Image (cartoon, rainbow, N blue to C red):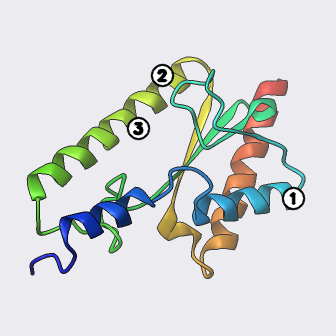
Amino acid sequence: MPDVLTPQQRHRCMSHIRSKATKPEMLVRKWLWAHGYRYRLNVKSVPGKPDIVMRKYRTAIFVNGCFWHGHEGCKQFVLPKTNTAFWQTKIERNRERDRQNAALLRSNGWQVITLWACSLTKDQLETTTQHVAVTLNQNLLRIVK
C-alpha cells in the first residue's frame, strides 16, 4: 500500500516523534517516584545515556519503543512496506547500539533493565513494574554485600 502522505507531510509527522519523555517512559518514571525510587534522567556520563539512571542500585533502565528498537515477536513491530531497506538498516543499527551499550554498562558493573513499550500497557503495567522493583532490590542487596 503506498504512503497516503506526501513526503513533506511524512517528514513533519516523523520529526515530531520524541526520544525523551515518551508516554511509556513517563509511566515508568511516575511509578518509580511514587514508590520511593529516586533516579536521574539521560545521564550523559553513563554509557548509552540510559533513559533512567539509578546510581544507588547501580542500574540503568532503557524504555524502548517496540518499533524503533525492533522488538522481535511483538505485534507493534512491523517493518514498513515502503523504503524497507532504509528501515531494516536503521532498526538493525539501533539493535546493535543497544547491545553494545548494554555490554559496556555490564562490563562497568552496572545492571541493565530493558523495558518494552508493549509491556507497559494498562493490563501489564503492574506486573512489569513489580518485576523492576524486585530486580532493583536484588541489585541493592548485591551491592551492599
Task: Name the residue beneath numbered marker 3.
Answer: 98
Per the model, the C-alpha gap separating discs 3 and 2 is 10 Å
Question: Which element carries disc 2, helix, strand or loop?
Answer: helix
> Who comes first in sequence, dot 1 or dot 2?
1
Residue 99, above or below 106 = below
Side of 39 where 91 appears, left or right: left
Say left or right for 84 vs 127.
left
Image quadrant where residue 5 sits = bottom left
**Disc 2: CA contacts within 10 A as few (<14), some (14-19) or many (>=20):** some
> Mark 2 = which residue?
104
CB atoms of marks 3 and 1 within 8 Å: no
Q: Is disc 3 placed on a helix, strand or loop?
A: helix
Q: Furthest-front residue in view?
A: 8
Judged left or right of residue 84, residue 50 is right
Amino acid bearing label 1: His
Image location (x, y in percent) of residue 86: 15, 50
Q: Are marks 3 and 2 in contact (CB under 8 Å)?
A: no
> Mark 1 sits on what residue?
35
Q: Which mark is residue 70?
A: none
Neighbours of disc 3 within 10 Å: few (<14), some (14-19), many (20+): some
Q: Residue at x 79, y 55 (%)?
A: 32
Give how far across and how far down residue 94 sits, in percent: 33, 42
